[in-house]
């Protein structure tokens, strides 16, 4: 599995993915526009993006370029990530995930767990 990472704090998100996955997931640090191209060419499987709000710069370009139905905001600024919401988004087939910068450390492990579980089946 390969995840493109864009938005703010890209290296923090990449490190969190690598830690949570135990090296099972490869990351590609890029821009949101770069991630669109990688997703369309099927060179990556998913996109994680972080911004201050969680629903703006983290995911807005992806929504416009690959469609709203493929994208979601996992956590907005001031929210606590909920495991059941993460699992719902993954099971709905979302491939682009936006999150607030403040939630990276809690959101990324839940996303990684849900994606690894989905892809193991």
Image (cartoon, grey):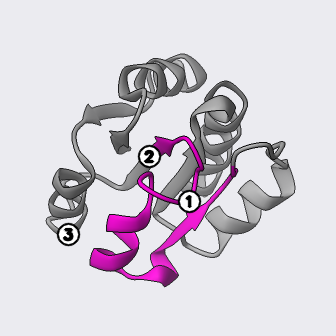
Q: Is residue 92 or residue 14 the one in the foreground?
A: 14
- Residue 40: x and y, percent? 20, 69
**In the drawing, what numbered circle is on residue 55?**
1
In what quadrant of the picture does the N terminus appear?
Answer: top left
As displayed, is residue 100 above or below residue 36? Answer: above
**In the drawing, what numbered circle is on residue 49?**
2
- Residue 18: x and y, percent? 46, 21
Closer to the chain start, of discs 2 and 3, is: 3
Q: Nearer the viewer, mark 2 or mark 1?
A: 1
Left or right, 79 with reference to 22: right
Res 93 → quadrant:
bottom right
Mark 3 nearby-residue class (10 Å; few <14, some 14–19, many ≥20): few
Mark 2 and mark 3: span between their CA atoms? 17 Å
Residue at horizontal 66 percent and vertical 66 percent from the top: 89
Residue at horizontal 16 percent and vertical 52 percent from the top: 34
Mark 3 and mark 1: span between their CA atoms? 21 Å
Closer to the chain start, of discs 2 and 1, is: 2
Mark 2 and mark 1: span between their CA atoms? 9 Å
Element class at badge 3? helix
Q: Which residue is mark 3?
A: 40
- Residue 16: x and y, percent? 53, 22
Element class at badge 1? loop
Res 101 → quadrant:
top right
Task: Say if mark 2 contacts mark 1, CB within 8 Å.
Answer: no
Q: How many marks?
A: 3
Magenta-tinted stretch:
50-76
């Amino acid at each position: 599995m390969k995840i493109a990472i864009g938005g703010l704090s890209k290296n923090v998100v990449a490190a969190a993915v690598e830690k949570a996955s135990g090296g099972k997931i490869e990351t590609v640090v890029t821009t949101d526009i770069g991630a669109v191209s990688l997703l369309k060419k099927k060179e990556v499987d998913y996109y994680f993006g972080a911004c201050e709000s969680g629903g703006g710069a983290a995911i807005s370009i992806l929504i416009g370029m690959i469609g709203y139905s493929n994208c979601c905001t996992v956590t907005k600024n001031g929210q606590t990530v909920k495991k059941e919401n993460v699992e719902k988004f993954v099971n709905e087939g979302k491939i682009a995930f936006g999150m607030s910068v403040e939630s990276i450390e809690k959101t990324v492990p839940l996303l990684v767990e849900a994606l690894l579980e989905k892809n193991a089946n």
